[in-house]
Amino acid sequence: MLKAGKDKEPSLKRNVSLFQAIMYGVGLILGAGIYVLIGDVAGVAGNAMWLSFMIAAAIAAFTGLSYAELTSMFPKSAAEYVFVKNAFKSNLAAFVAGWLITFVAIVSAGAVAIGFSGYLSGLFPQLDPVLSAVALILALSMINFIGIRESVWMNTVFTLVELAGLAIIVVAAALFGSFSEVDYYAMPLTVGTSFSLSVGAILGAAGLAFFAYFGFENLANISEEAKNASRTIPRALMISIAITTAVYIIVAVSAIALVGWEELSLTEAPLALAAEKAFGRTGLTVLSGIALFATSNTVLMMLIAGSRIMFGMARDQALPPALARIHPSTKTPWIAVIVTMLLVVTVVAFSQGSISAVANIAVFGIFIVYALVNLALIWLRYKQPELQRPFKVPIRIGNFPVIAGFGFITSLAMLTQFDSVTMVSGAVAITLALASYIIIAGYYKIRRSVPGQDDSDAMVS
């Protein structure tokens, strides 16, 4: 084994180009929300769900710009952990941010794996949904282990397939939909005509719809595997958000024109239902098959993100040092890959197939992280204005970055849109983060007190 800083500095391979980074971002964002959760969003906001997607897009853009600037300054794995640590010089705040984003990646992978099994069950009813989800996680973890080059090429192919599936919905709506006859502001009867309830429903659905957007931040966590990361990752962030926003709004309107919110909200495979309305059983089969590619793609990207965050934190001695080990052949953080796989399997096993509940918990956690990231950018603009910023968010008042301010406020506002169960789950996650920090800090303190121990624990083994 080679210890970092002694014989050879272990590093990840820089194989990711701008095009691949954009496809990575688009694949992360597209797969889960539009193929799996559009029915749940419709159930809350009705035909007005397109407004929810627009609000979610604006929130994503605010925070995405903050990620772009911070990534250009600190192109490292475990990005959120690095951002917060450099801004506030606090190991505890950085650990909470890193732990939460890891938690989100793991829970999200589990949620989308459940979505995958829902579509697979539509094609093969005899298959057990939980076992199908677990099998997917095991197979994609193997790809994650083999290498980032193989992973991003698989992502590129799968992303093009899922874009083709969404194009089918748009074409179907153009041929068979009733755009002119649809009331795009119609909402569930529980909302009625109350303006306040309508706004509340749209905002609540935006919180759920944001599950269809988050994932873009994980582009920052492959910075150490991207070519010219300080330029590539910020550009990929903005382009992928722009592409997916246009796609989401067009597809949401098209799905409503084909089947309406009521039917969309009653199925676990909403876009497959829309295709069936237009093209019969053939449409259902084709869209279900494409949805398998879309959801698989998102699970793969989340597995990559989770393992890279663990790797980056372990390298900085914020997690056990074994997680920083890099395989000598594949140049991937193999122990972090295995641990991520096991944790995602655990989420699936305990979720009992409820994707909406799992997704809500993930989104609640991500808004806490987004608030911290936006605050980190604001803080650095004041405390370290001299730092090099290859990409800088436009619009400021003095040193105050206005867009990051919007990102911070909207992130806090969205935290109020969740039910009490989700909030309690989020509080439990933060409590576990604090407990983990105490345990790991104690571990390293004991380790440093043992004669002959070396804390340069990122290893190739």
Image (cartoon, grey):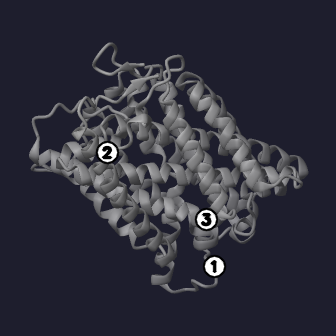
Q: Amino acid at mark 2?
A: Tyr
Which residue bears the numbered disc 2? Answer: 81
Which residue bears the numbered disc 1? Answer: 188
Identify the element where label 1 is drawn: loop
In the foreground, 117 or 172: 117
Q: Is residue 279 above or below residue 181?
A: above
Residue 299 image point, x, y percent: 60, 44
Residue depicted at 44% across the width and 41% down the height: 218
Q: Is residue 184 visible?
A: no
In the foreground, 330 or 160: 330
Which residue bears the numbered disc 3? Answer: 356
Image quadrant of residue 308? top left
Q: Amino acid at mark 3?
A: Ser
In the foreground, 329 or 395: 329
In the image, 202: left or right of 387?
right
Q: Is residue 233 above or below residue 165?
A: above
In the image, 377: left or right of 260?
left
Residue 176 image point, x, y percent: 80, 54
The furthest residue to the front: 451
Q: Amino acid at mark 1?
A: Pro
